[in-house]
Image (cartoon, coloured by chain):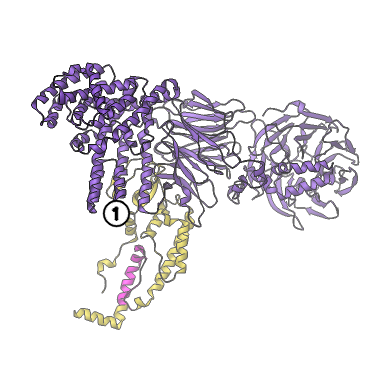
C-alpha cells in the first residue's frame, strides 16, 4: 500500500511540545487531547475547524486520558487522577492520588466502572469510579508499571512494567489474581519514556496486541496466553509505541517512531501507512464511528487522518451486526442526538453478539477445539446462516483455494499435499521454513529452505514446484519455480507480477521427465488473468478469464481451471464452471458446469492416475470427468460417495489426496478435524464404489466394478498413450472375467435373458465361449446356443471393425459414436483422412489379425442376423464425420482440434501402422466401411501367391476356369489400384485389403449391396470415391466370378460407374 | 499321557517371532519398484504413496533401511487395544480373540517402527496391561478344576506364544496332578493294561 497522501491529514497545533495523548469518547463525537501544557483539549470529531474546548484543572503535564460513556479520566504528573463528566465536560472530582509520584496511566474498562491507575510507585490501583474509596491494589511488581489495559469484558487486566514483564490479572474476584507472567515478550523501558508500551485488546476479547522486543507487534491469545503470531513488516523498524484496533477489529493501527501503519487483521499485511513529518507519534486512536484515525505527536500537535482505510477494503467501524441493524439505527437517528440511549443499545448488541461479530476472523487459531476460529462445528450454520443474513444476501462465495493446502495451525501448515509429495511450512515470524518431502524418496530428494517471501500458495508438479507469495506494501506478488532436478544450472527462476496483481491459484503441469517436455507453470491472478509459462520461465500465453478463479489443477498435458460464473446464486449455488485446457496448444478441450448441488462447495480438484480430471466436494462426493478427451462429450460421473463409508457413531472426514481408477487416496480425519496436521498422517487408500444400486449383493458389486471399469477403459481408449493398446486389452480381459461371473450368477438364478445380455457385452470371443460353457454346465442348451450365436456375431463384427476399435467400443452405446469419428475423420485433407485411419488399422492388426483370419470361416454362417445391423452402424458413424468435415472449414476450433487429434494419432500410430502394413499387406483404413461384408477371407487377388492359394478353397466348387480368371484378375487389380492410389499416403496398404474384401464380397454377393449405397450417398466427394473404388473392385470381382469372365482387371477404373449402377439397382 | 519329550521343549519366543515374520503387513514404500517375485509370493508393485502388502520380515528389513513406513495393523490401533483390554478385564471367564501373532508382531513393530505408530509409549503400556491381564487369567485358570484333576485346561483364544510359555510347566504339572489323582491311576493302569 502506498503512503497516504498528506491531504488526508489535518493538523492542529494545540499543545506545547512534549508527550501528547489522544482519546475518543465512546460515541465518537468528541476527541480529547492532553499534553504537557497542563491542558486537556476537547475537539468535536466532526468539526475539525471549530475551536476546541479545554479543561484547565491540571497543574502539571497530562500523561494519560481515558473516556467512558459518562466520564473522562485523566492522569497527570501532578500526582492526581481526575474525573470529568461527559458529555457535560465538567470537572467532577479526583479519582485518586499517588504518593508524590507522577501518575502515568489511566484506563477505564468498557463498562465505565473501574479505572486502572499506574504511577511511578510500584502499585497499580483499580479504582471504582462511582465510589472512589473502593480500591484494589496490584502490589506484586518490582518495577513501576507503565500501563494497564482492560479486556473488552472487563475480566482481565494486562499490565506492562518497566522490567519487561507482561502480566495478566483476573479481576473478577475480590482481589485481582495474577494468571500469567510473560517475560521476554515486551522490552524493558523507562517509566518516563516517550514511547508507550501497552497491550491492546482486540474488540473480540480473544487476543491482544503488544509491542515486542523485536519491534514487531505480537498477538497473544487468551487461550493459554501464548504468542500466536506477529504483525511484522520488512524494512527498518523502530520500537512500536501506540496500538489501536479498529472498532470492528478488522484493522490494527500501530505507530513506530513517526510512522503509522495500518494492518489488516486477517492478512497481517500493512494496508496503509503514513509518515508524520512533525514528530514521533505519542497518541493514536481509531474513531469508534467512522473511518478516521486521530493521533498526536510529540510536538504537541493533534492530527486527524481521514479515510485511512482505502475505499476498496471493508470499513473499520461497522460490524456485520451493525449492517444488519442499519435500519433501526437510522430510525434511532431520527430521534435526534440521544447518544446515551444509542450507546446503550449498541453496547448490548456488542455483548450479545460478540461471537458473531468476531468469530469469523479465521486467522487466529483456537487450540481448544482444534479448529481455526470460524471453521468450528457450526460452520455450516454460519455460512448458510438462516434469518437475516440470508434474506439480505446471498450465498457466501467460496474463496479460492489450492488443492491439498491447509490453514495455519500452531504456526504450521501444508502448502501442498498430493500423490507426489508434501510441502509443509513452519512460521518463524521473520520468515517461513519450507520443507519439501516426496513420497518416493528414490526418485526425488526432499529439501528445505528459508523462505523470506512467505509463500502462501504452492503447487507440486511432476517436474517441479511453483510457489507464489501475496503482494505486500512494497513488494509485488512473486512466483517462484524450482524444478526437481535439471541438467542446467540456475534452472529455478522467479518472476514478479504486476503491481496490484496477486497470484490466487497456481498449478505446475507436465508429465514425468521420461516423456520429454519440461512442464509448465500456470498462474491465475486477481486481475482475472491466467498466465501460462514454461518450466524455464518463458511466458507463453495469457488468458483473460475475467472471472474469479476458484482453483486450478494441472495434469500431464492439460490444466483444469475452476472459476465462478458471475456471482453465487441466492439459493446457495456456487455457480462454478470448469475449463479444461491443453497445455501445448492452449485449446480448450472441455468447458462446463461443475456439478455442485446447493450449499455444497468444491474441496479438491486434481487428476486421477489415468489422467482424468476429478473433483471432490464438501458433501463427500468424488466425481470424474468421463470422456474428457472428446469434444462436447465430457460429463461428470460420480465415482465415490464417502458418506457411504461413514459408520454409526464415528465421525470421520475424508481429505482427498488423489485417486486412481480403483482407489481413492485420502487422509481419514477423526472427529471434527477438517484438515490434516502434524505429524504427517498416512495416506489411506479406500476402495471406490460408484453409487450404483444393489451394492450389497454380488451382482451389484460386479455391475459397479464393470461400470467403473468401462470408465477407465474409455479413458484408455481415448488416450494418446502408446501403451494404451496394451492397457485396453488388459482391461478388456479383466472386464470379461467379471462379465463371466455375472453370467454365472445369472445362470444360477435361472435368469437366462440376463445371461445372454451379459454375454453380448463381452469383449473377447474366447470369453463368450467360456460363457457358453458356463451355460452348458448349468444344463441350459438353449442359452448356450444363443451365446454361441452371439460369439460368432461378435467375431464377425470384430473382424469388420478391427480397423476401428474405438467405434466397436461404442457398439453397445450407439449414441456417442459419431464424435470420435468426427474428431478423427478430418475430411479437410486427404492426408489427414488416411493418416487418421492408419492407427486403427495398426491397432486392429496387432490385436486381432491372427485370430480373425482363423475365425473367418466360422463367422460366415449367421450372416443374416448381422448384416442389417452393420450398415446402419456404419452409416451412422461415417455420416457425421463427413458433415463435420464440411463444417471444419468454417468452424476453426473444430478443425484445429481435429488437426490436433490427427497429429496425435499419427505420432503414436504412424510407425506401427507402417510396419504392420508391410507385414500384412492388406486391409486399409478406408476399407473399414466395407469390412462388414468382407466376411470371406479367401484373400484373392491382392495377395499375389498365397492369397490366390487360399481363394480356391471357396471356389473349388465352381470351376478351374474361375480360378484362372481370378488369378489374372487379381494381378490386374493390384496393379490398377496401385496406380490409382499410390499418390495418397498409406493407400498402397489399402489395396490388398480391398482385394481381400473383394473375395469376401464374392462369397456373400447377395448381401453386399445394402451398405454400399448408404455409405456412398452420405459420403462426401473424397471418401465416396474411395469407397467407390473399393466397391467397384469387389463388384468387378463378383461379376467376374458370377457373370463375366471376360473383363480384365485393368479396365476396372473405367468400369466404375458401370459396376456401381448394377449395385445400386440391386439395392433399390 | 505325557507328551513326548521333544514337544515339551516348545518353540522359543524367538522362533515364534521368526514364524510371525511370515505374516503380511501393509507398508508405504519410499521407493518405487515393479513387482518382485519372492519365494513366498509376488509382492508389489511399489508405487508410493500407495501402500503395498509384504511379509513382515521384508517390511522390517526395509524399515531398517528407511525405505518404507510400516502401516500398523488395524488391530494395533490405540482404540482397538483399549477396547480389547477393557473387554479382557470385564470378561473374567474367557480370553479375547486376538490375532494369532499378536504379541510377536506388536513387539517387533514397537521395536523397529515406533515412529510409524501413534503414541508408541501409550501403546506399549496398553499392551503390557493386556498381557498382564491375560497372564493373571492364565494363573487363575491353572487352579481350575480341570487342571486339578489333571485332565484339561481351557486354552481357547490363547496365542501360540502364551501357550508355549505355559506348556512346559503345565504339562509337567498335569502329569504330577494326574499321578496324584486316584482315578487317573486307574486310567493309567487300564491304558497300561491295554
**Rendered position, A934 above or below A332:** above
| Image: magenta residue range | B149-176
Residue A709, position in %: x, y? 36, 42
- Chain drawn in purple: A
- The secondary structure that dominates the magenta segment is helix
Front-most of residues A629 and B84: A629
Residue B175, position in %: x, y? 30, 75
Q: Which residue lies furthest to the left in this view?
A: A960
- Per the rendering, the colour in which chain B appears is yellow
In the picture, the quarter occupied by the C terminus of chain A is top left
The residue labelled by disc 1 is A750
Front-most of residues A954 and A181: A954
Q: In this view, does A131 lie to the left or right of A229?
A: right
Q: In this view, does A6 lie to the left or right of A38?
A: left
Chain under numbered label 1: A
Q: What element carries label 1?
A: loop
Q: Quadrant of residue A22?
A: top right
Amino acid at each position: 500500500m502506498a503512503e497516504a497522501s498528506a491531504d488526508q491529514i489535518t493538523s492542529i497545533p494545540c499543545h506545547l511540545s512534549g508527550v501528547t495523548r489522544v482519546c475518543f469518547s465512546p460515541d465518537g463525537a468528541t476527541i480529547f487531547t492532553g499534553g504537557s501544557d497542563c491542558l486537556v483539549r476537547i475537539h468535536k470529531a466532526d468539526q475539525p475547524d471549530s475551536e476546541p474546548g479545554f479543561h484547565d484543572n491540571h497543574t502539571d503535564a497530562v500523561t494519560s486520558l481515558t473516556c467512558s460513556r459518562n466520564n473522562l479520566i485523566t492522569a497527570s504528573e501532578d500526582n492526581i487522577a481526575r474525573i470529568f463528566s461527559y458529555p457535560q465536560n465538567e470537572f467532577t472530582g479526583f479519582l485518586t492520588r499517588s504518593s508524590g509520584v507522577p501518575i502515568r496511566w489511566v484506563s477505564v474498562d468498557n463498562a465505565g466502572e473501574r479505572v486502572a491507575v499506574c504511577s511511578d510507585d510500584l502499585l497499580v490501583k483499580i479504582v471504582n469510579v462511582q465510589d472512589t474509596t473502593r480500591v484494589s491494589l496490584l502490589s506484586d511488581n518490582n518495577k513501576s508499571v507503565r500501563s494497564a489495559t482492560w479486556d473488552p469484558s472487563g475480566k482481565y487486566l494486562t499490565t506492562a512494567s518497566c522490567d519487561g514483564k507482561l502480566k495478566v490479572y483476573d479481576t473478577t474476584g475480590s482481589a485481582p489474581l495474577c494468571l500469567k507472567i510473560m517475560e521476554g515478550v515486551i522490552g524493558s523501558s523507562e517509566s518516563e519514556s516517550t514511547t508507550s508500551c501497552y497491550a491492546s485488546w482486540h474488540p473480540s476479547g480473544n487476543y491482544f496486541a503488544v509491542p515486542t522486543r523485536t519491534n514487531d507487534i505480537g498477538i497473544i491469545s487468551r487461550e493459554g496466553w501464548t504468542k500466536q503470531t506477529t504483525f511484522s513488516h520488512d524494512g527498518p523498524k523502530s520500537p512500536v509505541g501506540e496500538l489501536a484496533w479498529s472498532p470492528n477489529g478488522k484493522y490494527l493501527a500501530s505507530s513506530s517512531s513517526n510512522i503509522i501503519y495500518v494492518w489488516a487483521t486477517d492478512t497481517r499485511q500493512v494496508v496503509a501507512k503514513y509518515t508524520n513529518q512533525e514528530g514521533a507519534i505519542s497518541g493514536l486512536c481509531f474513531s469508534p464511528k467512522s473511518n478516521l484515525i486521530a493521533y498526536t505527536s510529540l510536538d504537541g500537535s493533534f492530527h486527524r487522518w481521514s479515510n485511512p482505510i482505502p475505499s476498496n477494503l471493508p470499513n473499520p467501524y461497522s460490524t456485520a451486526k451493525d449492517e444488519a441493524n442499519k435500519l433501526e439505527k437510522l430510525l434511532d437517528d431520527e430521534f435526534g442526538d440521544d447518544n446515551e440511549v444509542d450507546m446503550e443499545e449498541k453496547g448490548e448488541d456488542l455483548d450479545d453478539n460478540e461471537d458473531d461479530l468476531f468469530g469469523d476472523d479465521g486467522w487466529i487459531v483456537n487450540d481448544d477445539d482444534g479448529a481455526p476460529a470460524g471453521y468450528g462445528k457450526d460452520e455450516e450454520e454460519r455460512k448458510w446462516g438462516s434469518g437475516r443474513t440470508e434474506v439480505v444476501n446471498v450465498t457466501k462465495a467460496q474463496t479460492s483455494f489450492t488443492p491439498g493446502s491447509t490453514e495455519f495451525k500452531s504456526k504450521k501448515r501444508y502448502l501442498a499435499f498430493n500423490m507426489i509429495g508434501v510441502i509443509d511450512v513452519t512460521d518463524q515470524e521473520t520468515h517461513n521454513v519450507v520443507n519439501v518431502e516426496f513420497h518416493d524418496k528414490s526418485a526425488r530428494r526432499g529439501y528445505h529452505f528459508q523462505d523470506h517471501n512467505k509463500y502462501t500458495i504452492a503447487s507440486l508438479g511432476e517436474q517441479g514446484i511453483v510457489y507464489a507469495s501475496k503482494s505486500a506494501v512494497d513488494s509485488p506478488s512473486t512466483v517462484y519455480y524450482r524444478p526437481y532436478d535439471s541438467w542446467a544450472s540456475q534452472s529455478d527462476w522467479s518472476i514478479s507480477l504486476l503491481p496490484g496483481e496477486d497470484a490466487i491459484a497456481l498449478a505446475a503441469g507436465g508429465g514425468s521427465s521420461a516423456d520429454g517436455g519440461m512442464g509448465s507453470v500456470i498462474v491465475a491472478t486477481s486481475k482475472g488473468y491466467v498466465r501460462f509459462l514454461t518450466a524455464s520461465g518463458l511466458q507463453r500465453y495469457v488468458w483473460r478469464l475475467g472471472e474469479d478463479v476458484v482453483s486450478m489443477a494441472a495434469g500431464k498435458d492439460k490444466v483444469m481451471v475452476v472459476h465462478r460464473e458471475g456471482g453465487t446464486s441466492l439459493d446457495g449455488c456456487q455457480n462454478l464452471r470448469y475449463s479444461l485446457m491443453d497445455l501445448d496448444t492452449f485449446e480448450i478441450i472441455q468447458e462446463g458446469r461443475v456439478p455442485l448441488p446447493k450449499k455444497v462447495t468444491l474441496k479438491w480438484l486434481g487428476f486421477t492416475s489415468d489422467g482424468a480430471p476429478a473433483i471432490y466436494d464438501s458433501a463427500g462426493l468424488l466425481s470424474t470427468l468421463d470422456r474428457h478427451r472428446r469434444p462436447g462429450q465430457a460429463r461428470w460421473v460420480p465415482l465415490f460417495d464417502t458418506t457411504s463409508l461413514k459408520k454409526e457413531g464415528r465421525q470421520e472426514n475424508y481429505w482427498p489426496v488423489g485417486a486412481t481408477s480403483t482407489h481413492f487416496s485420502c487422509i481419514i480425519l477423526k472427529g471434527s478435524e477438517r484438515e490434516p496436521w502434524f505429524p504427517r498422517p498416512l495416506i489411506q487408500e479406500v476402495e471406490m464404489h460408484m453409487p450404483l444400486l444393489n451394492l450389497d449383493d454380488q451382482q451389484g458389486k460386479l455391475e459397479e466394478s464393470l461400470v467403473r471399469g468401462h470408465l477407465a477403459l474409455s479413458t484408455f481408449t481415448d488416450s494418446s498413450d502408446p501403451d494404451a493398446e496394451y492397457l485396453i486389452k488388459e482391461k478388456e480381459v479383466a472386464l470379461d472375467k467379471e462379465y463371466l461371473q455375472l453370467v454365472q450368477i445369472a445362470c444360477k438364478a435361472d435368469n437366462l435373458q440376463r445371461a445372454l445380455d451379459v454375454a453380448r457385452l463381452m469383449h473377447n470371443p474366447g470369453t463368450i465361449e467360456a460363457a457358453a460353457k458356463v451355460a452348458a454346465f448349468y444344463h441350459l442348451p438353449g442359452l448356450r446356443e444363443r451365446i454361441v450365436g452371439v460369439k460368432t456375431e461378435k467375431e464377425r463384427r470384430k473382424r469388420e471393425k478391427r480397423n476401428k476399435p474405438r467405434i466397436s467400443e461404442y457398439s453397445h452405446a450407439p449414441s456417442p459414436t459419431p464424435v470420435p469419428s468426427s474428431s478423427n475423420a478430418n475430411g479437410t485433407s486427404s492426408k489427414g483422412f488416411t493418416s487418421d485411419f492408419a492407427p486403427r488399422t495398426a491397432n486392429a492388426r496387432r490385436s486381432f489379425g491372427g485370430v480373425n483370419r482363423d475365425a473367418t470361416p466360422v463367422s460366415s454362417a449367421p450372416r443374416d442376423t448381422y448384416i442389417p445391423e452393420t450398415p446402419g452402424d456404419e452409416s451412422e458413424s461415417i455420416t457425421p464425420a463427413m458433415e463435420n468435415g464440411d463444417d471444419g472449414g468454417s468452424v476453426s476450433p473444430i478443425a484445429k482440434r481435429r488437426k490436433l487429434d490427427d497429429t496425435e494419432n499419427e505420432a503414436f500410430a504412424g510407425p506401427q501402422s507402417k510396419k504392420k502394413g508391410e507385414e500384412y499387406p492388406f486391409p486399409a483404413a478406408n476399407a473399414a466401411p466395407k469390412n462388414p461384408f468382407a466376411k470371406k477371407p479367401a484373400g484373392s487377388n491382392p495377395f499375389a501367391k498365397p492369397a490366390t492359394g487360399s481363394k480356391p478353397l471357396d471356389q473349388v466348387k465352381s470351376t478351374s476356369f474361375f480360378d484362372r480368371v481370378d488369378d489374372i484378375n487379381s494381378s490386374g487389380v493390384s496393379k490398377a489400384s496401385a496406380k490409382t492410389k499410390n499418390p495418397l499416403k498409406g493407400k498402397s496398404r489399402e489395396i490388398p485389403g480391398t482385394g481381400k474384401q473383394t473375395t469376401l464380397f464374392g462369397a456373400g454377393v447377395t448381401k453386399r449391396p445394402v451398405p454400399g449405397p448408404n455409405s456412398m450417398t452420405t459420403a462426401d466427394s473424397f471418401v465416396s470415391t474411395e469407397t467407390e473404388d473399393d466397391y467397384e473392385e469387389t463388384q468387378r470381382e463378383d461379376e467376374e466370378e458370377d457373370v463375366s469372365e471376360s473383363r480384365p482387371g485393368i479396365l476396372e477404373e473405367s468400369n466404375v460407374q458401370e459396376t456401381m449402377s448394377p449395385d445400386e439397382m440391386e439395392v433399390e | 499321557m505325557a507328551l513326548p519329550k521333544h514337544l515339551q521343549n516348545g518353540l522359543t519366543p524367538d522362533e515364534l517371532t521368526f514364524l510371525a515374520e511370515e505374516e503380511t503387513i501393509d507398508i508405504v514404500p519410499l521407493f518405487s519398484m515393479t513387482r518382485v517375485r519372492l519365494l513366498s509370493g509376488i509382492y508389489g508393485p511399489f508405487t508410493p504413496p500407495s501402500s503395498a502388502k509384504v511379509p513382515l520380515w521384508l517390511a522390517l528389513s526395509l524399515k531398517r533401511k528407511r525405505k518404507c513406513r510400516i502401516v500398523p495393523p488395524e488391530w494395533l490401533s490405540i482404540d482397538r487395544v483399549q477396547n480389547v483390554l477393557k473387554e479382557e478385564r470385564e470378561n473374567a471367564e474367557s480370553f479375547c480373540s486376538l490375532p494369532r501373532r499378536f504379541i510377536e508382531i506388536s513387539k517387533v513393530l514397537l521395536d523397529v517402527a515406533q515412529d510409524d505408530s501413534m503414541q508408541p509409549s501409550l501403546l506399549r503400556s496398553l499392551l503390557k496391561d493386556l498381557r498382564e491381564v491375560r497372564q493373571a487369567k492364565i494363573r487363575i485358570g491353572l487352579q481350575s478344576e480341570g487342571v486339578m484333576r489333571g485332565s484339561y485346561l481351557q486354552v481357547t483364544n490363547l496365542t501360540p506364544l502364551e501357550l508355549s510359555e505355559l506348556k512346559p510347566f503345565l504339562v509337567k504339572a498335569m502329569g504330577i496332578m494326574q499321578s496324584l489323582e486316584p482315578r487317573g491311576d486307574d486310567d493309567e493302569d487300564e491304558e497300561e493294561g491295554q
